[in-house]
Amino acid sequence: MGLFERFRDIVLLTRTERAVMLFLAAALIVGAGIRLFHKASGGGEPYDYSRADSEFAARSHVPEPSGAGQESRSGKGRLPSPRGIDINRAGKEELMRLPGIGATIAERIVLYRRKHGAFRTLSGLRGVKGIGKKKLERIIPYCILGK
């Protein structure tokens, strides 16, 4: 009895399991060979992602209120002016200019204001269904409280 047969009897692998083990061993050897060849041939310099990362960061920057007149990221028109939108007086259309506020949430703000009265603080917008912590942080720079 040969060494391979003894090993097979000890390990008790099925024919399919042996085929998988053989495939994995071959893949390991081929991968090591490719890596060795790549290393021996000098291999290319690793790609520097810092330029792409800085370009991504610049393009995904949300403009501050001083960026009035710029196109909004949602493509819904212009962002509010630097003086902001009065959330106690603004209509549905004006509220929709806030980043992340669509027709449904703008309507909810107007209805909430009618039912509960004027907002006393900007954080009072959290009472409107659909406005969570993140959305509130995103729109606060564009909002003001009027009387």
Image (cartoon, rainbow, N blue to C red):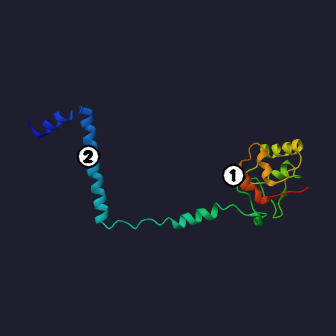
**Which label number is shown at residue 69?**
none
- Quadrant of the drawing holding the N terminus: top left
Tell me the kind of residue under disc 2. Answer: Ala
Please tell me which of labels 1 and 2 falls first in the chain.
Answer: 2
Q: Residue at x 28, y 52 (%)?
A: 30
Q: Is residue 57 visible?
A: yes
The quarter of the displayed image where residue 145 is located:
bottom right
Instruction: Return the x and y of residue 107 as percentages of the image width and height.
Output: 82, 43
Observer-side mark, 1 or 2, equals 1
Neighbour tally class for label 1: few under 14, some 14-19, many 20 plus, Cα within 10 Å: few
Residue positioned most to the right: 147
* Three-letter amino acid code at the position of disc 1: Lys
For the point 82% across and 62% down, the residue is: 81
For the point 26% across and 51% down, the residue is: 29
Distance between the alpha carbons at the discs numbered 1 and 2: 50 Å
Residue under numbered circle 2: 25
* x, y percent for residue 72: 73, 57
Q: Secondary structure at mark 1?
A: helix
Using the image as rendered, state which of residue 99 and residue 52 is in the foreground. Answer: 99
Q: Quadrant of the C terminus?
A: bottom right
Residue highlighted by disc 1 = 134
Residue 96 location, x and y as percent? Answer: 80, 50
Front residue of 70/100: it is 100
- The residue at the far left in this view is 1
Residue 65 at x, y percent in the picture: 77, 63
Residue neighbourhood size for the residue with mark 2, other residues' Cα within 10 Å, grouped as few (<14), some (14–19), many (≥20): few
In this rendering, the answer to whether 84 lies above or below 133 is below
